[in-house]
Image: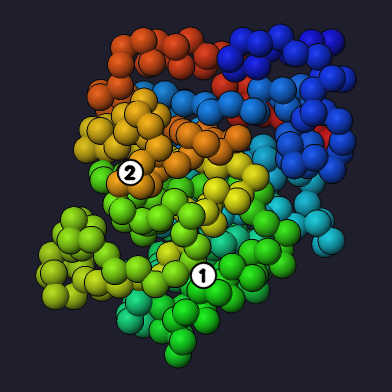
Amino acid sequence: MYYYTLQEDLINPNQHTAFQSENNAFARICPAPFRACMRTMKLIILNDYDQVGEWAAKYIRNKIINFNPGPDRFFILGLPTGGTPLGCYKKLIEFYKKGEISFKYVKTFNMDEYVGIPRNHPESYHSFMWNNLFKHIDIKSENTHILDGNAANLVEECDSFEKEIKAAGGIDLFVGGIGPDGHIAFNEPGSSLLSRTRVKTLAQDTILANARFFDGDLSKVPTMALTVGVATVMDAREVMILITGVHKAFALYKAIEEGVNHMWTVSAFQQHPQTVFVCDEDATLELRVKTVKYFRGMMHVHNKLVDPLPPK
């Protein structure tokens, strides 16, 4: 049997490297019929924020189910915070409560955390993750990994985080969001595309954007954070980036239609072998018409990736 890739190239799975070994990264998390279509950047264009959250959650659900995790084989999931992934998290909780998915054998690594605010502060990313996802599912606390912004030695904390990711076997799927300036995690414009987990001073635009979470008081907004680096995310076997809203339309344009640029750190993922951008209609407003038309024309293929899976 032959399969078409998303670039419409006919390939023979017996000759294609993605099919050669069950130890291959693609084989670990993607069923055979879809492995051939995973070696290309995908742009999923949906109508609105709610559809983005639902599609992303279904994609995560299917990845975990296909991986078939167990006591000696955990699925490693990278996660973001912020408003964009909330819809996805709500759907994942819904799938868990329906019995469609379990997180018992999933380990998570979060992208970032503020420096200097208490772990139990309502706006800490520890609180965000527990309130919006972890406490509603069956994940074990020891399998969740979030940077400690109050560590005695922040550099050592960052180095330790990188080592924990490596010890876990690397990240199977890293989910992220972006800011209007194209930053991913807290990799602000100008960040090295080879960066690793580190202490980062936040850009003024980011501080202003986050003020809404701190009663609009700029003096309460942390000015530093711990963040995974661009290269940390690039090391993941697959990356899914969620982009919603007209205020992020120019960032999406920079991410996929122009070259790789450290001033728009999300653009680095053009070079990742398995990147999925998931956006709503508003976020496409700066894209060329032919770009939108092309990727809309591929939705019949893309949507097969989130179809319900047959019982095992």
Q: Position of residue 267 (x, y in %)?
A: 40, 39
Q: Name which residue type carries label 2.
A: Trp
Q: Name which residue type carries label 1.
A: Ile
Number of the label disc, if any, that sits on residue 146: 1
Q: Is residue 75 visible?
A: yes
Q: Position of residue 26 (x, y in %)?
A: 73, 37
Q: What is the number of callouts on the image?
A: 2
> Secondary structure under badge 1?
loop
Number of the label disc, if any, that sits on residue 264: 2
Q: Nearer the viewer, residue 262 or 159?
A: 262
Q: Is residue 310 visible?
A: no
- Quarter placement of the N terminus: top right
Q: Earlier in the sequence, mark 1 or mark 2?
A: 1
Query: In which image quadrant can residue 206 be found?
Result: bottom left
Count neighbours of disc 2 (C-alpha within 10 A) and say few if under 14, some if 14 to 19, many if 20 or more.
many
- Please report the residue visible at 57 percent of the width from the left and 21 percent of the height from the top: 302
Report whether 130 appears left or right of 138.
left
Report whether 162 appears left or right of 198.
right
Q: Nearer the viewer, residue 305 or 90?
A: 305
